[in-house]
Amino acid sequence: MEVRVSCARNVRLIARLDIKGPNLIKGIHLEGLRVIGSPQEHALKYYLQGADELIYMDCVASLYGRNHLSDIISLAARDIFVPMTVGGGIRSVDDATQILRAGADKVAVNTAALANPSLISSIAKRFGSQCMVLSVEAKQVGPGCWEAYTDNGRERTGKDVVEWVSEAVALGAGEILLTSVDREGTRKGFDVPLIRAVSSAVSVPIIASGGMGQPGDMLDVVVNGGADAIAMADILHYNRASLSEVRETALRAGINVREYAQS
């Protein structure tokens, strides 16, 4: 199957913020979480650096049965004026409504969608497909084969990632947040074959997440993986590169990203 090439259209640069309680955290393979600092301070910094979007993920929502980010999102919405996607613990249309009322623009659903795929259709019908982001935690289980996981990459589902994404898009998912658990936090670059397998199977935008170690890592996943957006966490949190450096790398390579002049 022919791989889509995203170079001809704008590729979004997205800052990802994983949240535990009141703190911004970061782990490796979605485990071993370390506190980074204040979500609001980092989100504002990335916004001022020109992030096209922000993604907030509640890492412990599954423990509590609901998303606890409403206050954090409400605070962010006062000062940040780019789209915000919020995920973790969203199990119903009512949960989605609460997060959107707090200031989010999109909701990301993983565990609840696997348990009840009709939730995808319900959210898409209520708020539009562009609002319904399917979050996928993928682990490689064989050559060219990945399984969808839940609970920060701990729980197996038995679902093939490509088959699951195709099913979810048919149900109304308008975007895919595709996280490689194998690469997440490792700084070894994106799982390009994973991204390519999914981007080749569906026509909705794919956000590649997990593994970005240097600005140049985005080139392979965009050109050869067909990613429409890249999510960055570790590389930004530890100041190993700024959004402006990532943007300049993309522009030099002929990849269209939004030009942004810091004031």
Image (spheres, helix red, strand yellow):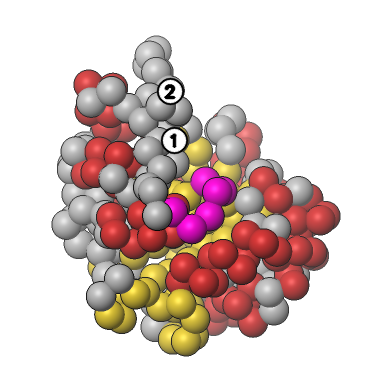
Magenta span: 200-205
Question: Which of the 4 image quarters holds residue 259?
Answer: top left
Left or right, 160 with reference to 244: right
Can you give x and y, in whole percent of width and height, for residue 77 in the image?
62, 38
Residue situated in front as seen by the camera: 242 or 150: 150
Circle 2 residue:
258
Residue flagged by tag 1: what amino acid is it?
A: Arg
Distance from label 1 to label 2 (Cα)?
7 Å
Can you give x and y, in whole percent of width and height, for residue 244 in the image?
29, 26
Left or right, 121 with reference to 201: right
Left or right, 32 with reference to 92: left
Mark 1 or mark 2, earlier in chain: 1
- Name the residue located 44 percent from the left edge and 53 percent from the top edge: 199
Magenta stretch, main secondary structure, is: loop
In this rendering, is residue 150 above or below 135?
Answer: below
Residue 244 visible within the image: no
Tag 1 and tag 2, C-beta contact below 8 Å = yes
Can you give x and y, in whole percent of width and height, for residue 91 in the image?
69, 72
- Name the residue located 36 percent from the left edge and 54 percent from the top edge: 196
Count residues near mark 1 (Cα–Cα under 10 Å), then give few for <14, some for 14-19, many for 20+.
some
Can you give x and y, in whole percent of width and height, for residue 261 in the image?
38, 14
Name the disc covering residue 25, or none.
none
Question: Which of the 4 image quarters holds residue 29?
Answer: bottom left
Circle 1 residue:
12
- In the image, residue 67 lies in the stretch drawn in magenta: no
The residue most toward the right is 126
- Name the residue located 73 percent from the left edge and 70 percent from the top edge: 119
In this rendering, is residue 115 above or below 36?
Answer: below
Label 1's element?
Answer: strand
Please state, as top left, top right, bottom left or bottom right, where the N terminus lies in the image.
bottom left
Please state, as top left, top right, bottom left or bottom right, where the C terminus lies in the image.
top left
